[in-house]
């Protein structure tokens, strides 16, 4: 990005001199352009370092400085260099941590040292300034909502004063940088909070598996012992059904944590037949949902190297989603296509349509379809986890939805997972 330069200050110009108002207007316009460019850069930056680079360019041009730097308080309350131009390591090491204001200062103002070699407050650094070639310097506080977050430094090779307008420009640039720092700090804290929350969910889900498993095993044992006693078996059946639903939620939470915090899924690819996998999924879902009509179509070579359990989970999630959210009594169609040598395609279609307002967030975690009140559908993680599993295999998931054609989820998988070993490929 090109930062507009401000017209140079005329040291001895008279207020009545011809052309002075025009020059002042030029400066004001250039200053406004500079601040606009800096604000745009701060708003669009993906990293705070991008803001620092543009700000250093801008303040050097605006103030005619030969060098500049930005220092920010760290977690221990020490001012550390974050970005700089033309400063030696010796200088940075010697002055790091120095601040003319206390950390809790609420109304810090810029400080100008117009002659670094004669200013008594700078006497401890005089020899350092001589070696560094610093004749004048200015401290400009970085203030975000009145809170001191760091400082801007500008340096000159020889003694120099700063007119009021230049100081005001420096303060405006510093405020933009401070606001950007505060924004990025807030984003980092929010991400850390979300990460800890996700870790907590994963730990909680992991710790729930053992007592939940023990409860289910005990209920199933009692159910077998009470066979034929209708009054006792009905509530036991409810306990087992609810426990199984809880177990599925726990597994989804664990998968969510693996996807978001644990670095993704660890796959165990092996020789797998997609058609056999789909037939097993259909059989299991038809037993639990006798009202569904499921049609499976197979074509081509459906052999490949994938993680059988994880791909079964993907297919089961997509078919269950089609059954739960499709038109009541509508048909669910599954198409497994292995006609391409390097890729297999799995399509799951139902006769329902997805509102356009929901399509952009369809794969978001914890998404719930708002126009459905059935809470048995879990945590809203099924599609998110399915997509992550497919991506882990090196594939992709697409969705198309029209009222006339229904909704189709299309999974494209490389015939062999990138994680498969040569032995698996045989």
Image: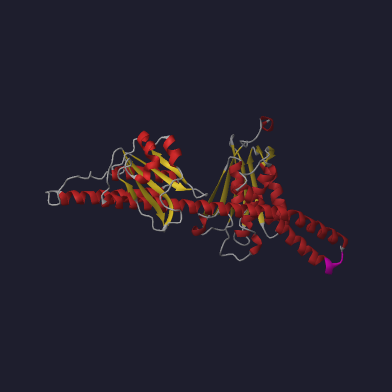
Q: Is residue 170 magenta?
A: no
Residue 195 vs residue 320, the one in the foreground: 195
Number of callouts: 0
Extreme-bottom residue of the structure = 231
Query: Is residue 55 something that shows in the picture?
Result: no
Expressed as whole percent of the image width and height from the top left, the position of residue 137 reads: 33, 43
Query: Is residue 130 something that shows in the picture?
Result: yes
Q: Quadrant of residue 144?
A: bottom left
Give the residue drawn at x 64%, y 60%.
377
Residue 247 appears left or right of 138: right
Residue 48 appears left or right of 272: left
Expressed as whole percent of the image width and height from the top left, the position of residue 165 reads: 26, 52
Q: Residue 25, relative to residue 338: is it above or below? A: below
Give the residue drawn at x 63%, y 41%.
299
Magenta stretch, main secondary structure class:
helix
Q: What range of the chain is rendered magenta?
A: 228-232
Expressed as whole percent of the image width and height from the top left, the position of residue 319 reads: 64, 52
Residue 230 vs residue 24, the one in the foreground: 24
Residue 57 vs residue 266, the one in the foreground: 57
Residue 217 appears left or right of 37: right
Expressed as whole percent of the image width and height from the top left, the position of residue 181 reads: 44, 50
Q: Which color scheme did the rendering employ for the protein?
A: secondary structure
Residue 119 vs residue 103, the one in the foreground: 119
Quadrant, the N terminus? top left
Q: Is residue 231 magenta?
A: yes
Q: Quadrant of residue 305?
A: top right
Q: Residue 269, relative to residue 72: is it above or below? A: above
Q: Residue 3, relative to residue 108: is it above or below? A: above
Quadrant, the C terminus? top right
């Amino acid at each position: 990005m090109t930062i507009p330069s401000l017209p140079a200050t005329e040291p001895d110009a008279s207020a009545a001199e011809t052309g002075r108002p025009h020059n002042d207007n030029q400066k004001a316009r250039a200053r406004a352009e500079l601040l606009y460019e800096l604000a745009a850069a701060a708003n669009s930056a993906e990293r705070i370092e991008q803001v620092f680079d543009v700000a250093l360019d801008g303040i050097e041009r605006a103030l005619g400085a030969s060098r500049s730097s930005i220092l920010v308080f760290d977690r221990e309350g020490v001012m550390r260099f974050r970005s700089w131009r033309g400063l030696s390591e010796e200088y940075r090491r010697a002055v790091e941590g120095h601040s003319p204001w206390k950390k809790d200062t609420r109304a810090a103002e810029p400080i100008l040292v117009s002659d670094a070699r004669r200013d008594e407050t700078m006497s401890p650094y005089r020899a350092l300034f001589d070696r560094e070639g610093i004749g004048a310097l200015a401290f400009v506080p970085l203030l975000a909502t009145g809170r001191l977050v760091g400082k801007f430094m500008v340096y000159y090779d020889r003694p120099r004063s700063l007119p009021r307008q230049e100081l005001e420009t420096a303060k405006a640039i510093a405020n933009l940088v401070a606001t950007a720092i505060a924004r990025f700090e807030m984003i980092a804290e929010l991400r850390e909070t979300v990460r800890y929350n996700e870790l907590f969910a994963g730990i909680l889900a992991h710790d729930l598996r053992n007592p939940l498993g023990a409860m289910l095993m005990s209920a199933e044992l009692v159910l077998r012992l009470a066979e034929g006693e209708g009054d006792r078996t009905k509530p036991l059946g409810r306990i087992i059904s609810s426990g199984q639903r809880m177990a599925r939620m726990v597994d989804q939470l664990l998968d969510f944590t693996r996807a978001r915090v644990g670095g993704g899924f660890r796959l165990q690819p092996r020789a797998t037949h997609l058609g056999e996998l789909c037939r097993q999924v259909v059989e299991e879902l038809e037993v639990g949902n006798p009202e569904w009509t499921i049609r499976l179509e197979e074509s081509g070579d459906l052999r490949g190297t994938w993680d059988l359990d994880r791909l079964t989970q993907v297919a089961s999630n997509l078919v269950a989603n089609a059954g739960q959210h499709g038109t009541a009594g509508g048909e669910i169609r599954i198409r497994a296509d292995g006609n391409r040598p390097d890729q297999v395609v799995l399509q799951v279609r139902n006769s329902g349509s997805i509102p356009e307002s929901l399509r952009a967030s369809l794969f978001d975690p914890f998404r719930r379809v708002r126009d459905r009140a059935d809470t048995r559908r879990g945590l809203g993680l099924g599609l998110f986890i399915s997509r992550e599993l497919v991506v882990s295999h090196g594939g992709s998931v697409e969705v198309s939805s029209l009222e006339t054609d229904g909704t189709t989820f299309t999974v494209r998988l490389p015939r062999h997972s990138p994680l498969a070993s040569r032995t698996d490929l045989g």
